Amino acid sequence: MDWQNPSPMATTKTLRDLVFRPDAAAAEPLYVQLARALTEAIRSGRIAIGSRLPSERDYARAAGLSRTTVTAAYQELKALGLLRGYVGRGAVVIADDPDRAAAGAIAWTQLASRRAPRPLAAGAGTAPGLISFSDGWLHPSLVPQASLSTAAARLMQGSELLSRAAPLCGLPVLREALVGALRAGGVKATTEEVLVTSGAQQGLNVLARALLAPGDTVLCETPTWYGAVRAFRAAGAEVVGIGMDHEGVDPDALEDALIRTRPKFVYLMPGFQCPTGRLLSLARRRRILQIGGRHRTPIVESHVYGELAFGERLPSLKSLDTAGIVIHQGSASKAISPALRLGWLVAPAAAQELFVAAKTSLDLSTPSLTQAILAAFMATGEYARHLTAFRSALRGRRDALIAALAQHCPELRYARPEGGLYLWVRLPRRLAARDFEAAAAAAGVAVRNGDVFQVDAGVSDHIRLCYAAPPLDEIVPGVQRMARALRSALHHQRQSEGPASALASV
């Protein structure tokens, strides 16, 4: 029985017929005796789950007990997880066994914050035999395991690293290494302008907590990384999406939205954007910086894929910024290893003060060991050598995926990305991405439907494929499974549209 939709009230006669006989000689109080009698009645089924008990006043009057005794007995049952009180409905029996009551004693979904994001639909990414293009992780062959393991083993021998937490802003040695890498990319930064975070997602939560309040607005591309949208909305902000074309976000549409919404900041992914893989052109980068400066609006540049160019790399927004409006976000997860869970925010010192204060409410320190491993990895020159090999391997995987799609799924449409991890694929007309995702899972291959990346919760006709995730030798078999799923989905689509088409022609 659904205890949130209870059955009619258990009558006072039912409760009186429980043959509760107070024992005046017992050491335990009267309310405990009554609670035990009610518990036994519930466990035996004489009072069913879902029953609504009479009010304390009514039951006390009918059973010849004091109201205080009945109230205390009801409280005991609530503490055991057998009973729950509802405003306007009284006390309802919600379980029949104190040992199992904890699982259902609290209606957790009713306690959720009004701003809490809805859970994402669970994927089939761990099903046995599944080939996954779904999640944006790296196949183990792409991770510099030997270099990271060597650095970790050497660092584990030091007692100081293992006995202290890192400073809130990050290990000085890592911040210095990051400043060196940033300067190599044209970003002039000091260690005071770098805040190390526990992954890029924590960086987004820091930004949201530091800068946003209910009623604020954030502008971003659409589609975009859903983790950013969820972080901003959890802070109470409205997120407004700006459309893109093959060169990235449209500057004119962006400026129109700036004038119309007066946002707190703009969130962009200029380099190989997730999920589309698009690259914001140099001309648009300069134009967007001009627009942001003119309207005095900060721009958050997510650069987590910016280093993964297969050819010439465009300068980051931060390196082109002369007005001090860009907050630069980086990550080790997409270029080195997701297990490190390290990211960083680069911003003017005045902004960093806000971010540091916000980070203290999320954690007191990003783990020292992973920071030290990354710092050692970067200091030896391994990072630069790794990036060269990594980009080459990603490019080969992209080409293998595109060649397989051209052979087995010619109905699909996409633009060839010049970097990053993803291929943004358009499905045949009127085929919904969520339907194809389900058909693909049934065929043994996981894809990510485009709905989750839509800022406006619209229905997408695109899927995102990550060519970095599966084993290289499973890319072709995975596409072959997608081809079977595509034929199946199109067949079901034609069947569902058949009667409607016939009626339309009458």
Image: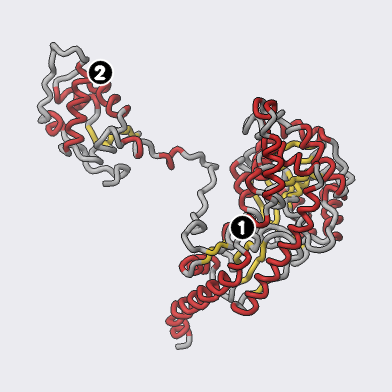
Q: Look at the picture and state if 228 lies above or below 82.
A: below
Numbered label attached to residue 68: 2
Q: Secondary structure at mark 2?
A: helix
Q: How many marks?
A: 2
The residue carrying pointer 1 sits among few (fewer than 14), some (14 to 19) or many (20 or more) residues within 10 Å by Cα, namely many
Residue 398: x and y, percent?
69, 67
Toward the right, the furthest residue is 322
- In which quarter of the view is residue 202 placed? top right
Task: Name the image quarter holding the C terminus.
Answer: bottom left
Estimate the spatial distance between the alpha carbons at disc 1 and disc 2, rounded to whole Å: 56 Å
Mark in front: 1 vs 2: 1
Q: Look at the picture and state if 282 lies above or below 95.
A: below
Question: Colour scheme in the image?
Answer: secondary structure
Amino acid tagged 2: Thr
Closest to the observer, 125 or 501: 125
Q: Look at the picture and state if 319 lies above or below 495.
A: above
- Relative horizontal placement of residue 143, taking residue 132 as reference (left or right): right
Residue 308: x and y, percent?
76, 57
Name the residue that disc number 1 marks: 453
The residue carrying pointer 2 sits among few (fewer than 14), some (14 to 19) or many (20 or more) residues within 10 Å by Cα, namely few
- In which quarter of the view is residue 98 placed? top left
- Relative horizontal placement of residue 212, taking residue 131 as reference (left or right): right
The residue under the point 65% across, 37% down is 209
Numbered label attached to residue 105: none
Residue 351: x and y, percent?
78, 35
The residue under the point 13% across, 18% down is 22
Amino acid tagged 1: Phe
- Relative horizontal placement of residue 65, taking residue 312 as reference (left or right): left
- In which quarter of the view is residue 244 placed? bottom right
Q: Is residue 456 visible?
A: no
Tell me which label, 1 or 2, sits earlier in the chain: 2
